[in-house]
């Protein structure tokens, strides 16, 4: 019997505590997901040049070397990557960031300090990945 490959998600997060929380929540609520961690945008781009593309990328906006804004722009400008769902998961609340994400057809989600909100984010993303419908996340 052929085994279904896991749903691969690149998570660009330089904060260890934030990544550990996401990893724990995914293990609990969506164990079929494989999280691949990147600590900056340059590593995300390197990961995308590999053999198989991820099902989604979760990007923090404020990271060292190459931030989430630059990374989002580079992904969406590449014809091989532009259809990958990009979820901006950030504490930033600047309207300029929201407008950039919307213009580049990304999904903007505010990082919450509430565990319940973080659980809800993982559940919504899990459902979106399984149905390939991200409309409820915007």
Image (cartoon, grey):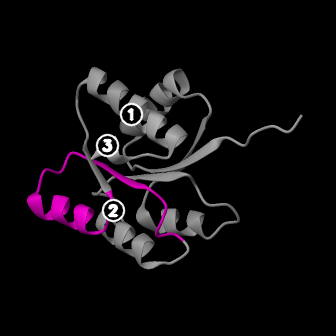
Q: Nearer the viewer, mark 1 or mark 2?
A: 1
Q: Secondary structure at mark 3?
A: helix
Whether 49 is among the magenta residues is no
Q: Give the magenta part as a residue range.
A: 81-106
Question: Eyeballing the image, is 104 above or below 92?
Answer: below
Q: Position of residue 68 (x, y in %)?
A: 33, 62
For residue 124, the mark is 1
Q: What separation in Å lies between label 3 and label 1 (alpha carbons)?
A: 7 Å
The residue tagged 3 is 137
Task: Name the foreground residue: 45 vs 29.
Answer: 29
18 relative position to 42: left or right: left
First-in-chain label (2 vs 3): 2
Asked if marks 3 and 1 touch (Cβ < 8 Å), the reply is yes
Task: Name the foreground residue: 22 vs 29.
Answer: 29
Measuring 62% from the left and 32% from the top, which residue is drawn there? Answer: 32
72 relative position to 31: left or right: left
């Amino acid at each position: 019997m052929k085994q279904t490959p896991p749903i691969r998600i690149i998570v660009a997060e330089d904060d260890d505590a934030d990544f550990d929380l996401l990893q724990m929540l995914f293990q609990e609520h969506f164990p079929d997901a494989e999280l691949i961690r990147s600590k900056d945008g340059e590593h995300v781009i390197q990961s995308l040049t590999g053999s198989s593309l991820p099902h989604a990328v979760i990007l923090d906006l404020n990271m060292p070397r190459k931030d989430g804004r630059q990374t989002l722009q580079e992904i969406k400008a590449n014809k091989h990557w532009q259809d990958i769902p990009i979820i901006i998961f950030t504490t930033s609340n600047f309207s300029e960031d929201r407008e950039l994400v919307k213009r580049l057809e990304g999904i903007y989600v505010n990082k919450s300090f509430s565990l319940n909100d973080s659980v809800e984010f993982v559940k919504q993303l899990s459902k979106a990945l399984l149905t390939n419908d991200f409309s409820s996340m915007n």
